[in-house]
Image: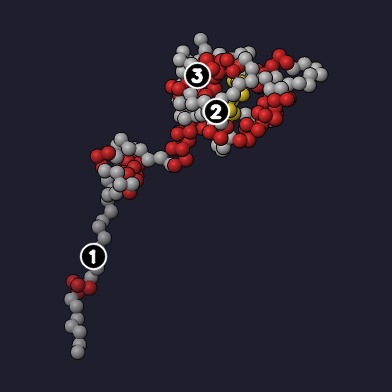
Amino acid sequence: METPERSAAEVKAPSAPAASHAPASAGANPGANVPGASSSGAGAACAVDTAAAEAGIPPECASIVRLAKLDELLALGRANSLWPLTFGLACCAIEMMAAGASRFDISRFGAEVFRPSPRQADVMIVAGTINRKMALAVKTLYDQMPEPKWVIALGNCAISGGPFVFPGQYAVVEGVDKLFPVDVYVPGCPPRPEALIEGILALEEKITGKRRWPRVPPQ
């Protein structure tokens, strides 16, 4: 059976539209009128909407709900619920007690829950002089704290031995960092409770990577 021949109109391919020879105006966006082209802001908004939709968030709540990585949420929770270990070594411990009292009130930062056991604490505030006879006990307390854990050296004695360092002395450990790592140093002899609060804020910034409040430059 012979196939009927197609007409010339059917065989002829459609011709491409003629290109415009008009010069483009200076500063014009060549992709402004292209379908599917969008600015970076619109693309980011589409990405956020897509992520919210994948997480099952209703569209009307997408503007007030933010998604974060699990590590960031854990760091935020840890930074706002620091539990110091209940122990003091010398006079700097009095300043630490004052920071926990009503006038300075470190409960505003979630750090007032002083724990009686190192197994329940995640922050060790070394407040005072560390004698060599006491060094093994302090190191044992540090080892019994679960990970993650942090250390604040409060006062000059905990940082470098303070006024008890002189040639030939043998009774004082010249800095708690000789025993285990230190995250934040708070200098002073003794440092005031506000200095300890600043040390806690610095530790929060180290955990989360963000500052709770902006730093105030000294007048």
Instruction: Report which residue position mark 3 lands on.
Output: 100
Checking the image for residue 14, the label placed there is 1
Name the amino acid, label 3: Gly
Please state the horizontal and vertical placement of residue 8, each as a whole percent of the image.
19, 74
Q: Residue at 43% x, 42% y: name it.
A: 69
Disc 2 to disc 1, C-alpha distance: 86 Å
Q: Residue at 22% x, 73% y: name it.
A: 11
Rendered position, 145 above or below 8: above
Which of the pair 202/43 is nearer the observer? 202
Please state the horizontal and vertical placement of residue 16, each as a whole percent of the image.
26, 60
Which of the pair 66/4 is nearer the observer? 66
Mark 2 nearby-residue class (10 Å; few <14, some 14–19, many ≥20): few
Please state the horizontal and vertical placement of residue 42, each as a whole percent of the image.
31, 41
Disc 3 to disc 1, C-alpha distance: 84 Å
Q: Residue at 19% x, 89% y: name it.
A: 1
Instruction: Report which residue position mark 2 lands on.
Output: 116
Q: Report the mark closest to the observer, 3 or 2.
A: 2
Answer yes or no: is residue 142 visible.
yes
Mark 1 nearby-residue class (10 Å; few <14, some 14–19, many ≥20): few
